[in-house]
C-alpha cells in the first residue's frame, strides 16, 4: 500500500536580519493510510515547522530550500496557491495547540464551521447547518444545536478543542495534522481529547500526524513514530519497537526522561547541554555535543540511516560499529 | 413603498422641464452678496441689510445719486416744508399707498413707525435725536417738532433707521423681523429667508409705482462670504451682481465677456487716526512728518488699482462739504526728515503701533507700505491686526496705552459732513469715535455753529465745514488716505443700474430691466 | 460589567468633562479683548446705546454672576443669542450643525470606505509595492493642509475641469424650483425621504468636493490604523487555523481578520471625527459651506463669544457622543464584552 | 523603555524614507537660517515691498513669482520657514515642557493629585483641537508667540497622559523603591530617576507630532491668528494668495502650501522612522 503522504529530504530555512536559520536540515518519512504517526522532539527541533511545511503555512520569511512533499501523487510544494487552498482543510486539516487562540473570538462556532463547509462543499444553507450540528454532536459537545450560536470564549478549554476538531473534520479530510493538540489542556481533559481523536480516526479512517513532545502520548496513541533532533530525523519506526528497543542515544535519553505514569511530563530537558541553534552550520552528528557515546567520527560526518529492521531506522554512527551490531 | 418611490422619481423628472419654463417666465436677478444681513429690523439695522430694507421699505425722502439736479426727491412724502427756523417740518404723504400686509399708509403709520425706531434707540436711531414729537395733522399730513434746528429732510432720506414699516409690524419685536417677516411699502416682499445663506424677494404686485414690461420681479440674494466664489459666480453668469472683490481682480474681470465693472466714487473713505495725546505723536511736527512719509500714490495706484483717489480733507469728493482747495499731503521723505529733526528726532528712532481690522487685507497692506516708507526716516511701525471691537477697545481704554495709528473706515449715516467731523474729531470727555483724542476748541466751535445753520443756510455751513477741515490738516490730526471707489460688477444684459453712494451697495431693483 | 453600569460610568465622566469644558470656554471667552456690548449694538453705536446694552446683556455684572445666568439659561436649553447677528444661537445651530455633520459624516464615510480596504490589503501584503504606496498615501493624507488641498481641488475640479461646483450646499435653481423640505437639516436625507431626487443629486454634487478634501486626514488615519491592526490580527493563531482550513484569502482578510482589526480602527474613528470637525472649520470657509466651522470662524473674527461658547459646547457634546457610540459599537461587535 | 541611541540610529538609517526626510528638513532649516545670505531679496523676505514687481509671474528672476506687494516668493518662503518650522517645534517643546512634569507628578504621587490632573486632561482632550486653540489665540490676541502658546495649551495633555503611563511603569522598579526606602526626596526621585527613564517615548512622540503641529499652526495663521504682517509664515502666504488663486495667480498659494505639505510629510516619515527604530518589537517590520 502506498503511503498517503511522503516527505523527502525536506529542508526549510528562515531568513532573519542576522542570517539564515536552518529549521529543517533534510528529513524523510512517510505516513501510511489509516496510521497515526507521532512526530516527537524538543522545542525547536522542527516538528511544528514540518507540519506547517506540509500545509504550506510557513511564515513569510521561511522558505523550503529543498525536498518534496508527496500527497496522493502530487508534490504539494509544486501546487499553485489556489490548488493548495483546495487541499487545506479539505484533504489535509490541522488542529492546533491552543484552541483558545486558534478559534476566532468574534464568530460563533457554527459560523466558523459553516465557513469551512462553504469553502469546500459549497453546501446550501440548510445542509451546512445540519452537517455542522452533526459534527458538533460527533465530537461530543453537549447540546450541539445550541453550540452553533456560542462564541469560543463561552466554552471550556476541552470544549474549545472539541470544536476545533469538529472544524478540522468538517470537510472530511484524508489527513489531519494535530500540532500538540492537548498540551494546553488539563490531564483529564487531555485523555478525553485523545480518546476522541482515536475514535474519530478509526471511524473515519483518517491518517494523522501527531506532533508532540510527549513520548507517553505517542505510546498511547500512535502506530508510527519519527524522532526529530535539530531539524534531522534521529530515529523512526513502529512505536512498539522504538519504545521497546530505542537505538538512537537521543531517543534513549528521551525515554529515560519520561515520567512515571500518572505524573505530568513535559520537561524533557534532562539531557545535558543545549539543542544547537539554527544559525550553526552543523558538521557531523547534531547530537554529538550532548551524546554520552560520542566518537570522533560523530564530529566529522553526519550519520546515514541504518536499517534496524524493515520498519525501524536510526541515524547513528554507533550502528555502523560492528561491535555494537 | 418602492413603487411609490419610483412614481415620485418619474413625476419629478416629468416636472423638471415644467419648472424650467416657469423659471423663464420669471425675471430673476441674482445678487451675490458678500455678507449676511445682520439685523432685518428696519428700526435697528444699520449695516448691510440696507439692501433688503431699500427694496422692501421706503423712506419719506430720497437722496439722489450724484449728478442729479436736486439733492433730494420725494418718495413716500410728496412734498415737505420747514419753518423759518427749521424746527418744525411738515410732510405731505403720498395717497393710495398700502403696506404689504394690507394696512393703509398714512400719517399715523409714519408716526407709529418712527416712534418705534426712536423708542428702541438702537442702530442709527440716534439720527432722530433732534425730534421732540411727531404729530398726525391729517390723514396724510405729518408734522415733526424739533428740539433744535436740523436738516430733517436729509435725515429722513437716510439709508438706515428711516424706513416706514406697517403699523402691525411696528408692534413686533426684532426677532419677528429676523425670522424673515416684513411689511413695508416697497416694490418687493420677502418670499423666503434662509439666514446667512439666501433670501428671495418677489415683486409686490400692488406697488404704488406700478409695473412695466421687463422689470425684474424676483430677487435672489445669495450670501457668499468668499470673494473667490463671488468672482466665479459673476464670471459664469450665475450671479448678476456683486461687489467686494479684491481690487486687483477687477482689471482682469472687466475683460471677461458679459460683465461690466462699474466704478464710481463712494461716500466712504479710509483714514488713519493719529494719537494726539501720547508721545511722540502728541507733537504736531511728528504727526506732520509721518503724514509726509505716507506713500499716497503707491497706495492708490497699487492697493486700490488706481480706482480710488487720494483724500483731500475728511469729506469725500462728490459730497457736500468737500473742499477742492484744501491742502493735500504728499509723499515727501525729505520734508518728513526735516520735520522730525525739528521735533527733536533727527535720526528718527521712534516706534509706533498701527492697528487695523485683522481680516482686512487692504488695511494691512496700507500698513505694510507705510512701514517700509517710515523705515527710511528711522521710524519703526508695528502692524497689528485685531477684531474691530478689540481695536476700538484698545483705543478708548487709555490714551497712554492706545495704538499710535488707527486704520478707520468712515461713511455717513445720513449725508452730512458732520458725520465725520463731529464723530471723529470733536473733543469729548469720554471719546467714542474720536479715537485719536483730537481736542481743538476752535475746531469744536466752528463745527457746532455749522451744524446749527446747516438746516437753513447750507452754503454757509459748507464753508465752515471746509474751514474746520483745514484745521485738521494743519494739525495733521489724521492721515486722510483714500476716498474709496464703489465698485460693482453687473452682467451686461441688465440695464437701468445707477450706483447711489448714499445707500451703499443698495441696488434699487425696481429700476432694473432686462 | 453590565451595559448599564458601563453607560453610567461613561456618562458621569462625560458630564464632568462637559462641566470642565463649559467653565474653561466661558472664562477664556470672557477675557477676549473687545467690547461685546459694542458688537451687539451693531455698526458704529452711540455710547448710550452701548451702555444700555451692557445692562441689558448683564455684562455690567461680576463674572461669576454672568456665569450663573449663563448656566441657568443653558439648563433651559437656551444657548443665548449671537452678539453679532442677534439671532438665537439655537436656531442658527439647528441649521449649521446638520450641515457640518453631513459634511463630516460624508468625509469620515469616504475615509472608512476607501481607507479600510486599502489598509486591509496593505496589512495583508507587507513590504509589497502596494504597501509602500499605501504608506505614502497615508502619510500624505495626514500631512496635507486641508485648506490648501481645498484650493487645489477647486482649481482642478471647478476651474480646470468644470466637473463640480465651487462651493455652497445646494444650487440656486434647486432651492428655487425644487426646494428641500427641511426635516433633519441633512439635505441628502431630507431630499431622499421626500423623493426630491433633483435636489438630492444637486446636494450630492455640492457635497463631493468638500467631503473628499475633508476626508484626507481621516483617510490617512483609517489606512494606518487598519493596516496596523491587520498586521496584528493576521499574526493571530485563528488566522493560521483559518488558512489551515483552506478558507479563501478574501474570506480571511475581509471577514475574519477585518472584524478583529476593525475595532482598534474604530476607536480612531472617534478621534478622526473630531479632527474632521476641526478640519471642517477651515474647509467650510473655502467652500462657502454654511456650517458650524464657518459660523465659529466668523464668530472668532467678530469676538462673538456667545457663539464661540455655544459652538464649543455643542461640538464637544457631539464629540463625547461619538466616542460613546464608538465604545458601545465596540462592545456590540465584541462578544467577549458582555452587555447585561 | 530605555533605548540605546546607537542602535536606534542604526535602524533609523536603514529607513530610506526617514533619511530622505531628514535631509529635506535639514535643507529647509538651513535655508531658513541662512536666508539672508542665500537670497538677493532678503529685505523683501522681511516684508519690504517692490511695487514694480507686483504679481510677477514665476520666471527666471522670481522662480516662484512675486506677491501682491511685489515681494519675491522664494525669499518670503525662506523667511516664512523660520516661523513655520519654529512654531511647530516650539509647540511640541512647550507642550512637552508642561505636560511631562505634570504627568510624572500625577503618575508618581497617585491619589487625588493624579485624579485631579487626569480629569483636567480629560477636559482639554474633549475639545476639538483647533477650536480651543482658536479661542485662546483670539483671547490672547493674534501673534506668533500667542499662536504657539494657544496650540501648546491644547497639546500638553497628550504628553501628560504619556508621561503618567510611563511613570506608572517605572515607578515600581527596584531602584526607585530602593531610593524611596533610603529616604530620597520625591522631587529628586522624579527628576533624577524617573524623568530620564521615560524620556525616550516622549521624544519619539514629539518627533511624530511636529508635523501635525506645523499643520495646526498654519491653520491658525490661515485664519489670521498667527504671524502678523509684515512678516509671513506659510499659512499666512496661502491665506494672502487665496484671493487671487482662481483668478490666474496660482503661484501665490501653491508654493507655500507645497512647503507645508512636504515639511509635514517629512516630519511624519521621520517620526515614523524614529518610532520604529526605537522600538525593538517594531524593527522587524523594516
Image: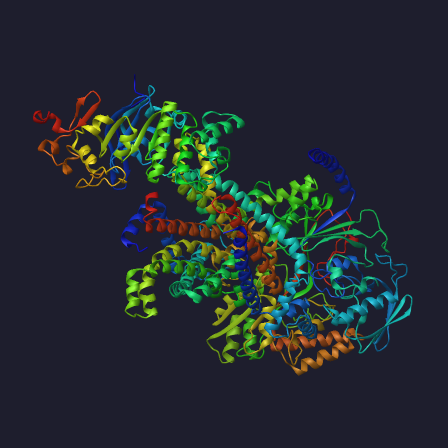
Q: Quadrant of the C terminus of chain A?
A: top left
Q: Whole-percent x and y of residue B326? A: 66, 72
Total number of numbered discs in the rendering: 0
Give the image's coloring scheme. Answer: rainbow
Q: Nearer the viewer, residue D148 or A11?
A: A11
Residue D25, above or below A3? below
The quadrant in which residue C315 appears is bottom right
Residue D181, above or below D283? below
Q: Whole-percent x and y of residue B329? A: 59, 71
Q: Is residue D4 left or right of residue B149?
A: left
**In percent of the image, x 60 and y 55: which residue is there?**
C292
Farthest-out residue, top: A1
Q: Whole-percent x and y of residue D177? A: 30, 64
Q: Nearer the viewer, residue D24 or B111?
A: B111
Residue A184, above or below B240? above
Farthest-out residue, bottom: B441
Residue D58, above or below A182? below
Q: Whole-percent x and y of residue B428? A: 66, 80
Farthest-out residue, right: B138
**In percent of the image, x 47 and y 24: which residue is there?**
A121
Amino acid at each position: 500500500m502506498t503511503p498517503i503522504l511522503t516527505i523527502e529530504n525536506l529542508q526549510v530555512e528562515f531568513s532573519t536580519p542576522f542570517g539564515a536559520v536552518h529549521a529543517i536540515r533534510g528529513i524523510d518519512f512517510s505516513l501510511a493510510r489509516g496510521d497515526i504517526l507521532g512526530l516527537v522532539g524538543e522545542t525547536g527541533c522542527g516538528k511544528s515547522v514540518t507540519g506547517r511545511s506540509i500545509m504550506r503555512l510557513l511564515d513569510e520569511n521561511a522558505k523550503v530550500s529543498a525536498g518534496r512533499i508527496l500527497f496522493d501523487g502530487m508534490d504539494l510544494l509544486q501546487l499553485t496557491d489556489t490548488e493548495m487552498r483546495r487541499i487545506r482543510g479539505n484533504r489535509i486539516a490541522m488542529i492546533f495547540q491552543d484552541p483558545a487562540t486558534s478559534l476566532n473570538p468574534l464568530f460563533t462556532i457554527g459560523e466558523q464551521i459553516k465557513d469551512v463547509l462553504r469553502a469546500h462543499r459549497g453546501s446550501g444553507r440548510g445542509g451546512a447547518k445540519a452537517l455542522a450540528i452533526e459534527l458538533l454532536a460527533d465530537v461530543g459537545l453537549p447540546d450541539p444545536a445550541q453550540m452553533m450560536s456560542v462564541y469560543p470564549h463561552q466554552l471550556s478549554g476541552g470544549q474549545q478543542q472539541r470544536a476545533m476538531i469538529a472544524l478540522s473534520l468538517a470537510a472530511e479530510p484524508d489527513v489531519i495534522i494535530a500540532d500538540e493538540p492537548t498540551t494546553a489542556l488539563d490531564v483529564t481533559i487531555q485523555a478525553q481529547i485523545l480518546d476522541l481523536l482515536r475514535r474519530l480516526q478509526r471511524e473515519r479512517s483518517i491518517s494523522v500526524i501527531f506532533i508532540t513532545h510527549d513520548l507517553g502520548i505517542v505510546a498511547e496513541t500512535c502506530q508510527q513514530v519519527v524522532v526529530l533532533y535539530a531539524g534531522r530525523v534521529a530515529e523512526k519506526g513502529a512505536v512498539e519497537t522504538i519504545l521497546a528497543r530505542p537505538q538512537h542515544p537521543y531517543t534513549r535519553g528521551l525515554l529515560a526522561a519520561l515520567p512515571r505514569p500518572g505524573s505530568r511530563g513535559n520537561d524533557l530537558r534532562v539531557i545535558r547541554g543545549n539543542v544547537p541553534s539554527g544559525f550553526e552550520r552543523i558538521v557531523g552528528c547534531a547530537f554529538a555535543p550532548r551524546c554520552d557515546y560520542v566518537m570522533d567520527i560523530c564530529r566529522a560526518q553526519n550519520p546515514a540511516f541504518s536499517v534496524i529492521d524493515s520498519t525501524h531506522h536510526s541515524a547513528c554512527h554507533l550502528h555502523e560499529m560492528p561491535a555494537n551490531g | 413603498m418602492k413603487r411609490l418611490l419610483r412614481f415620485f422619481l418619474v413625476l419629478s423628472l416629468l416636472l423638471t422641464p415644467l419648472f424650467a419654463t416657469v423659471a423663464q417666465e420669471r425675471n430673476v436677478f441674482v445678487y451675490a452678496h458678500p455678507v449676511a444681513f445682520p439685523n432685518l429690523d428696519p428700526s435697528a439695522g444699520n449695516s448691510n441689510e440696507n439692501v433688503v430694507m431699500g427694496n422692501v421699505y421706503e423712506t419719506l425722502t430720497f437722496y439722489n445719486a450724484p449728478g442729479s439736479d436736486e439733492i433730494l426727491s420725494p418718495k413716500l412724502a410728496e412734498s415737505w416744508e420747514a419753518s423759518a427756523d427749521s424746527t418744525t417740518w411738515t410732510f405731505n404723504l403720498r395717497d393710495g399707498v398700502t403696506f404689504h400686509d394690507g394696512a393703509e399708509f398714512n400719517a399715523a403709520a409714519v408716526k407709529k413707525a418712527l416712534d418705534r425706531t426712536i423708542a428702541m434707540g438702537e442702530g442709527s436711531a440716534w439720527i432722530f435725536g433732534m425730534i421732540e414729537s411727531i404729530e398726525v395733522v391729517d390723514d396724510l399730513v405729518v408734522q415733526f417738532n424739533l428740539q433744535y434746528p436740523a436738516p430733517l429732510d436729509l435725515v429722513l432720506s437716510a439709508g438706515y433707521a428711516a424706513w416706514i414699516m406697517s403699523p402691525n409690524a411696528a408692534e413686533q419685536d426684532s426677532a419677528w423681523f429676523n425670522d424673515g417677516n416684513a411689511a413695508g411699502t416697497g416694490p418687493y416682499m420677502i418670499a423666503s429667508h434662509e439666514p446667512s445663506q439666501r433670501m428671495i424677494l418677489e415683486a409686490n404686485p400692488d406697488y404704488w409705482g406700478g409695473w412695466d414690461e421687463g422689470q425684474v420681479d424676483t430677487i435672489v440674494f445669495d450670501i457668499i462670504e468668499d470673494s473667490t466664489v463671488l468672482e466665479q459666480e459673476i464670471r459664469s453668469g450665475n450671479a448678476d451682481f456683486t461687489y467686494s472683490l479684491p481690487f486687483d481682480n477687477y482689471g482682469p474681470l472687466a475683460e471677461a465677456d458679459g460683465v461690466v465693472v462699474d466704478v464710481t466714487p463712494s461716500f466712504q473713505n479710509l483714514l488713519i487716526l493719529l494719537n494726539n495725546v501720547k508721545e511722540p505723536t502728541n507733537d504736531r511736527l511728528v504727526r506732520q512728518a509721518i503724514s509726509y512719509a505716507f506713500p499716497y500714490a503707491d497706495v492708490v495706484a497699487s492697493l486700490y488699482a488706481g480706482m480710488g483717489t487720494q483724500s483731500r480733507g475728511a469729506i469725500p469728493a462728490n459730497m457736500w462739504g468737500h473742499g477742492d482747495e484744501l491742502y493735500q499731503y504728499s509723499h515727501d521723505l525729505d520734508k518728513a526728515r526735516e520735520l522730525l529733526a525739528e521735533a527733536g528726532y533727527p535720526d528718527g528712532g521712534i516706534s509706533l503701533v498701527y492697528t487695523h481690522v485683522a481680516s482686512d487685507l487692504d488695511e494691512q497692506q496700507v500698513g505694510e507700505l507705510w512701514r517700509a516708507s517710515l523705515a527710511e526716516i528711522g521710524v519703526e511701525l508695528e502692524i497689528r491686526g485685531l477684531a474691530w471691537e478689540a481695536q476700538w477697545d484698545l483705543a478708548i481704554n487709555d490714551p497712554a496705552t492706545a495704538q499710535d495709528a488707527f486704520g478707520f473706515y468712515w461713511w455717513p449715516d445720513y449725508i452730512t459732513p458732520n458725520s465725520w467731523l463731529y464723530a471723529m474729531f470733536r473733543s469729548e470727555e469720554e471719546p467714542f469715535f474720536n479715537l485719536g483724542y483730537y481736542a481743538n476748541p476752535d475746531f469744536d466751535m466752528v463745527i457746532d455753529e455749522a451744524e446749527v445753520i446747516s438746516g437753513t443756510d447750507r452754503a454757509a455751513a459748507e464753508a465752515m465745514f471746509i474751514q474746520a477741515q483745514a484745521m485738521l490738516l494743519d494739525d495733521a490730526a489724521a492721515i486722510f488716505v483714500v476716498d474709496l471707489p464703489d465698485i460693482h460688477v453687473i452682467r451686461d444684459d441688465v440695464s437701468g443700474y445707477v450706483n447711489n453712494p448714499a445707500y451703499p451697495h443698495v441696488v434699487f431693483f425696481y429700476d432694473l430691466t432686462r | 460589567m453590565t451595559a448599564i453600569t458601563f453607560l453610567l460610568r461613561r456618562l458621569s465622566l462625560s458630564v464632568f468633562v462637559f462641566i470642565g469644558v463649559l467653565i474653561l470656554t466661558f472664562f477664556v471667552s470672557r477675557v477676549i479683548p473687545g467690547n461685546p456690548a459694542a458688537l451687539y449694538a451693531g455698526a458704529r453705536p452711540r455710547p448710550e446705546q452701548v451702555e444700555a446694552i451692557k445692562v441689558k446683556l448683564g455684562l455690567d455684572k461680576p463674572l461669576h454672576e454672568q456665569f450663573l445666568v449663563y448656566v441657568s439659561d443653558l439648563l433651559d436649553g437656551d444657548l443665548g443669542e449671537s452678539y453679532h447677528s442677534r439671532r438665537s444661537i439655537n436656531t442658527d445651530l439647528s441649521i449649521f450643525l446638520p450641515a457640518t455633520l453631513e459634511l463630516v459624516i460624508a468625509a469620515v464615510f469616504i475615509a472608512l470606505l476607501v481607507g479600510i480596504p486599502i489598509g486591509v490589503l496593505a496589512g495583508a501584503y507587507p513590504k509589497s509595492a502596494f504597501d509602500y504606496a499605501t504608506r505614502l498615501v497615508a502619510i500624505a493624507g495626514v500631512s496635507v493642509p486641508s485648506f490648501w488641498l481645498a484650493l487645489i481641488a477647486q482649481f482642478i475640479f471647478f476651474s480646470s475641469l468644470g466637473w463640480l461646483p465651487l462651493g455652497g450646499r445646494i444650487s440656486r435653481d434647486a432651492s428655487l424650483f425644487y426646494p428641500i423640505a427641511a426635516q433633519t437639516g441633512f439635505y441628502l436625507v431630507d431630499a431622499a425621504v421626500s423623493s426630491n431626487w433633483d435636489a438630492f443629486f444637486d446636494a450630492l454634487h455640492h457635497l463631493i468636493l468638500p467631503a473628499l478634501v475633508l476626508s484626507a486626514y481621516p483617510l490617512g488615519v483609517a489606512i494606518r490604523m487598519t493596516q496596523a491592526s491587520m498586521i496584528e490580527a493576521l499574526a493571530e493563531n485563528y488566522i493560521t487555523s483559518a488558512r489551515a482550513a483552506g478558507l479563501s484569502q478574501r474570506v480571511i482578510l475581509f471577514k475574519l481578520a477585518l472584524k478583529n482589526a476593525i475595532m482598534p480602527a474604530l476607536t480612531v474613528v472617534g478621534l478622526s471625527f473630531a479632527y474632521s470637525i476641526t478640519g471642517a472649520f477651515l474647509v467650510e470657509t473655502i467652500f462657502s459651506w454654511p456650517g458650524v466651522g464657518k459660523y465659529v470662524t466668523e464668530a472668532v473674527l467678530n469676538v462673538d463669544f456667545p457663539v464661540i461658547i455655544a459652538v464649543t459646547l455643542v461640538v464637544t457634546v457631539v464629540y463625547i457622543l461619538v466616542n460613546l457610540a464608538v465604545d458601545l459599537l465596540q462592545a456590540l461587535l465584541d462578544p467577549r464584552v458582555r452587555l447585561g | 523603555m530605555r533605548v540605546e541611541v546607537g542602535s536606534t540610529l542604526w535602524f533609523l538609517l536603514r529607513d530610506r524614507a526617514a533619511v530622505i526626510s531628514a535631509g529635506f528638513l535639514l535643507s529647509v532649516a538651513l535655508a531658513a537660517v541662512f536666508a539672508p545670505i542665500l537670497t538677493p531679496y532678503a529685505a523683501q523676505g522681511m516684508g519690504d515691498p517692490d511695487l514694480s514687481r507686483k504679481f510677477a509671474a514665476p520666471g527666471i528672476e522670481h522662480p516662484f513669482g512675486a506677491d501682491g506687494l511685489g515681494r519675491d516668493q522664494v525669499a518670503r518662503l525662506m523667511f516664512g520657514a523660520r516661523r513655520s518650522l519654529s512654531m511647530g517645534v516650539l509647540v511640541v517643546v512647550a507642550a512637552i515642557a508642561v505636560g511631562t512634569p505634570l504627568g510624572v507628578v500625577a503618575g508618581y504621587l497617585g491619589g487625588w493629585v493624579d485624579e485631579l490632573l487626569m480629569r483636567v486632561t480629560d477636559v482639554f482632550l474633549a475639545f476639538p483641537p483647533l477650536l480651543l486653540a482658536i479661542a485662546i489665540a483670539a483671547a490672547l490676541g493674534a501673534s506668533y508667540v500667542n499662536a504657539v502658546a494657544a496650540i501648546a495649551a491644547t497639546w500638553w495633555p497628550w504628553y501628560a497622559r504619556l508621561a503618567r503611563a510611563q511613570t506608572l511603569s517605572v515607578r515600581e522598579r527596584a531602584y526607585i523603591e530602593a531610593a524611596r526606602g533610603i529616604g530620597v526626596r520625591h522631587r529628586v526621585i522624579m527628576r533624577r530617576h524617573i524623568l530620564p527613564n521615560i524620556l525616550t517615548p516622549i521624544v519619539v512622540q514629539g518627533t511624530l507630532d511636529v508635523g501635525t503641529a506645523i499643520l495646526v499652526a498654519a491653520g491658525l495663521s490661515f485664519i489670521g491668528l498667527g504671524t502678523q504682517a509684515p512678516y509671513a509664515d506659510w499659512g499666512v502666504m496661502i491665506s494672502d494668495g487665496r484671493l487671487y488663486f482662481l483668478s490666474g495667480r496660482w503661484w501665490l498659494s501653491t508654493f507655500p502650501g507645497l512647503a507645508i505639505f512636504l515639511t509635514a510629510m517629512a516630519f511624519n516619515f521621520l517620526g515614523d522612522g524614529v518610532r520604529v527604530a526605537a522600538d525593538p518589537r517594531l524593527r522587524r517590520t523594516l
